[in-house]
Image (spheres, coloured by chain):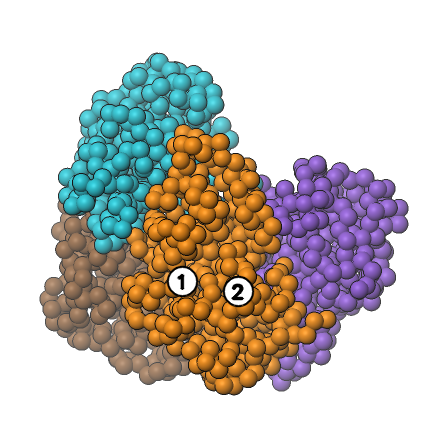
Chain colours: A cyan, B orange, C purple, D brown
Amino acid sequence: MRKKSSAAIIGASGYAGEELVRLLLSHPDVDLVAATSRQFVGQTLAQVFPRFLHHERAKALKFVDVDPKQLVSAAESIFLALPHGVSAEVAKPLVDLGASVIDLSADFRIKDAAVYTEFYGKDHSAPELLKTAVYGLPEIYREKIKTAQVVACPGCYPTSILIPLLPLVRAKIVDLARIVVTSLSGVTGAGRKVEPDYLFAECNESIRPYGVPKHRHLSEIEQELSILADEKVVIQFTPHLVPVNRGIITTIYTDLGKDVVDLDPGLLFSGACGQEPFVRLLGDERLPDTKNVVGTNFIDIAWKIDKRTGRLIVMSAIDNIVKGASGQAIQCFNLMRGFPETAGLI
Amino acid sequence: MRKKSSAAIIGASGYAGEELVRLLLSHPDVDLVAATSRQFVGQTLAQVFPRFLHHERAKALKFVDVDPKQLVSAAESIFLALPHGVSAEVAKPLVDLGASVIDLSADFRIKDAAVYTEFYGKDHSAPELLKTAVYGLPEIYREKIKTAQVVACPGCYPTSILIPLLPLVRAKIVDLARIVVTSLSGVTGAGRKVEPDYLFAECNESIRPYGVPKHRHLSEIEQELSILADEKVVIQFTPHLVPVNRGIITTIYTDLGKDVVDLDPGLLFSGACGQEPFVRLLGDERLPDTKNVVGTNFIDIAWKIDKRTGRLIVMSAIDNIVKGASGQAIQCFNLMRGFPETAGLI
Amino acid sequence: MRKKSSAAIIGASGYAGEELVRLLLSHPDVDLVAATSRQFVGQTLAQVFPRFLHHERAKALKFVDVDPKQLVSAAESIFLALPHGVSAEVAKPLVDLGASVIDLSADFRIKDAAVYTEFYGKDHSAPELLKTAVYGLPEIYREKIKTAQVVACPGCYPTSILIPLLPLVRAKIVDLARIVVTSLSGVTGAGRKVEPDYLFAECNESIRPYGVPKHRHLSEIEQELSILADEKVVIQFTPHLVPVNRGIITTIYTDLGKDVVDLDPGLLFSGACGQEPFVRLLGDERLPDTKNVVGTNFIDIAWKIDKRTGRLIVMSAIDNIVKGASGQAIQCFNLMRGFPETAGLI
Amino acid sequence: MRKKSSAAIIGASGYAGEELVRLLLSHPDVDLVAATSRQFVGQTLAQVFPRFLHHERAKALKFVDVDPKQLVSAAESIFLALPHGVSAEVAKPLVDLGASVIDLSADFRIKDAAVYTEFYGKDHSAPELLKTAVYGLPEIYREKIKTAQVVACPGCYPTSILIPLLPLVRAKIVDLARIVVTSLSGVTGAGRKVEPDYLFAECNESIRPYGVPKHRHLSEIEQELSILADEKVVIQFTPHLVPVNRGIITTIYTDLGKDVVDLDPGLLFSGACGQEPFVRLLGDERLPDTKNVVGTNFIDIAWKIDKRTGRLIVMSAIDNIVKGASGQAIQCFNLMRGFPETAGLI
């Protein structure tokens, strides 16, 4: 058996944090040594999350307050599952102490502090870290992640959008000025926010668009698409809230140039991500369904060419909390620690 | 009190049929005199639908088989809530007998029998009726509906798409070649189909696109948009199934020409449908939510201009069974019979 | 047309308050003249509840603060939809000013202030009103309600339990010491409480008992059963939370004495409530389903005799917000004002 | 690594069958060598269940027809996930060929063929097997299961009822004549039945009792309770259907004799099942919630003494498809094969 690696979670009481607890407790190579939550200090993980009541470590480990020195000395890797803004502040001393940090917030995803300010409405508290932080999408940045000190895990929507668009934008097969994206997300996507909008009776039997037209995730989506295309890419993106706990369906409309009517998307996708351990290509016969990915780290991708309109429609399904957050964080962690990329995830 | 008008429903056991029963039983100007359902012949409406157990008429009226002569002699208006294909066959003798027919299927929506065959996979059995049938969207065809013998009620998706697009396409303010539409629908949209795909555990906690890229409703949507624009319009349309009983959210992406950046959509929408009794304009501050329209005949419309992309995004919400089917059918019936358009609907 | 009666709602922003708004806006005999909500003062009803956006009164009427004199001078009847404890405090000056009060909280349901203190954990602030307040269950107290100044509308669980038990307890056909009641309620039963337990992702895909073994509603249930039986009745009651917006199913287990094995419950129920306008007797063939009563003021009642165990099982279904709260309040209001009991409710 | 054991599933396309596939594919000691389904012969597991699309075995293994000789020669253990009635017919030749059979239907649960006929409405086709089949509840029959040739896995409701009642009935602490049980189940409990009652829009926003008063599972519940008590036990049991995919909450009302008011249920439960690997005792402070057990093989048990009524209320939560069916089947399989009881389940 490989030697276990120690890990800590800061902000372990939200949905992404709870999922990190679940995944790390069952990860064969991990020793979960600490978890913080201001709200639950002194209670065990099992008390706060009764689903872990059978787990010895969950029954023993108590939530603590954030003490950077103690955390860094106890844990080789530190996961941050905190609200944006807070995360950068908490990360700074950890990084200074040499910690290996995997951040699930938006705070280290944006390269340009001005863009961060534009989209998140406040100045970045540790802009110097933006240069070295690596965007934690293994399907693009696998090698960089392996040696990063700070990994910024992508948002859930960006994950569901960037992986399918990767081969199309890199090859510039589609009209970069005309990408339109619609996403549908389950309610945990909003986090464990105790607000009227997320009460059961407000979400159940409700469907609604939100964040129109300039959702915050656009900042990282366009940043990454622009890097892939090596030119500025601006897209249209509309998220919708639907009454499921977990899951995102993303439907992407791309315009094919007339020259590429003979395009075989299957070849393109196979070439780009046919070997990816967490990408499942459904081809042009099946359509994705969130129920096939919920609870897993997979992204399912399907496509259809519409000859009537000259568009290629690409659709993806992920679990917003796993591949869209905590699972992807573990995937990055595995890369950083030299474990098999799928360890603890399949 | 106005004299009541007699009405019958053929195919009253599906979701649209049941909703017609509900609306007609409580319509102040209607006397529901007959309902047919092969499956339930001999049972009363109240036995089949226990929600009507308190209603005297529902306790007395028994489902019968279709007998055209009897139906036509008993009822001034006949609603058809049958599957496409079946509906045209049943309608033909009724029309020949002089009946006033309000059809909820797709059978009389398409002007061109060849297009019907292309999208519905079979030849039309009464193509001669296609010329005189009126498309039952009061927001466009109010006057024609008043004098029609056969009204073809629009599909649920087309209703949610055509009303918001009406002013934009008529005024040709948007690029007609680049309209992209995403819709999200509740499960009753599929009808009361006893198929594995619509079982509770297959739909609950599931989100999925379907009918990509050429859903049948495209035939009537493009027909009507082309009439409005007086040129051929082809659009992109992707429906998604989400786990609610009722409700459709439609999100429409339109490209504004550069000349119209100063467009005030509010003026445009107010002018086009500000006086419509069932259109509620939310403006550019609020976003639609199906829970505000479920159970009603309203369509809520909102919009946002995205200056970053030059697009105008228009969103609508309807109840697929009411404004998208049975409510709109009653609205047409009211027009045909000379009742107030909102009778029995508000 | 009858002359309209003026009404006001205090605490109109919770689920029961919103439902009162809906019902009163469409009540043919009511003029809704005022609505209060600390949170939304200055906003119109239509702004806070977009489902009423088409309604002229809802667009005109703004939420105000509670001003007893103004309310009493403006409205003949005042509905209180406030948390328990708060309600008695607000009601006191209104009653002193001579207002006709229909209270939806628990504050005036309990005759004995000591029992109130035991179950609600605080002393009653207006115990002198407990003597004159009438328990607003028309199926028991119809005549008293007609002349009451203060009506205390029953809780949702008590409504679903007391009506079915009424004939059994009054006739002492069942063993009064052995009544066991299980109820299942939708999430609006908890009110619009912004607490983690009621977030979508905490309730969806969750079933759970709560309030075991001494739920507050026991105080009024046992009080009323004891009055009916003219002896002290203690029952077992366990509520469960299930992921629907609205609806309560109550299943009641009663022990029949050996002498009554020939009991015909149908005769008993028909005799007791066969003429009640909102009671629908399903008999011993059908079972209740909340979806048949949601949105209505009906209570559906079914029963089965189990010869194996000597028990009579009685089951009921109501909408917790309508017959369990706001609809029943309107039913009482109709009785108090001399309107037909079903006005605005069917 | 231990040597893998070969297993086959007959009837792998229902919900229990699909869950067996999931659990066996990831079981460290199992080689899934065959799966049958009349409906899907020739398709791979991955084609039928896209959630397994990444799994090599699921991509390779095709559904076949039932060929007893071939199955018995290929697989050391055979799981049957068939409808009752069918299962006994299919099992007979397998048993004659010496196969080790784990049956998930009701066919081998009842010792007395006459009781089977009474509750299941048909004669048993292999009554001679009833004597040797072992009821697959490890918490009672662990030792017998280890050496059984045919294990009859308990129904989902019986599992949720028998484990909590085990210590109470064995010790005869409660009045055996007065046990009342209410259960609430998710919709997969009905199996993948393509019937109108289980369509999404019929179950969603619906709560309903069913199977009142004599649900089939009573036969095995009372059989096992009678064995435990060594006297005939008759109970009251009412199941309810609620709109979740998975999960059962069972609430049990028991009458304590007056002598046992000082009972400490905690001691009793700890003694009886404190060491059980899949029983989690919540005590008298917490209440169960299905969301803590869904996807797992755990049963959570809580209790409350109600001094007002002299009753002990015991509540349990399980996943009906895991501990209530396929997980428990694997637990039995582990015992039969000598693997750790929790292998592949935690």
Q: Which residue is mark 2?
A: B145
Q: Quadrant of the N terminus of chain D?
A: top left
Q: Is residue A215 above or below residue C24?
A: above
Q: Which mark identifies residue A341? A: none
Residue depth check, mark 2 versus mark 1: number of the one nearer the observer: 2
For this view, does C154 lie left or right of residue D167? right
Query: Which quadrant of the view contains residue A163?
Result: top left
Q: Is residue A9 above or below residue C121?
A: above
Q: Nearer the viewer, residue A300 or D265?
A: A300
Query: Which quadrant of the view contains residue D222?
Result: bottom left
- Give the residue at x 41% y 37%: B256
The mark tally for this picture is 2
For this view, does D7 lie left or right of residue D114? left
Q: Which mark identifies residue B190? A: 1
Element at label 1: helix
Q: Is residue C270 above or below residue B16?
A: below
Q: Is residue A147 above or below residue A81?
A: above
- Kindly tell me whether residue D337 is visible in this rendering: no
Output the chain of dot 1: B
- Give the residue at x 65% y 59%: C322
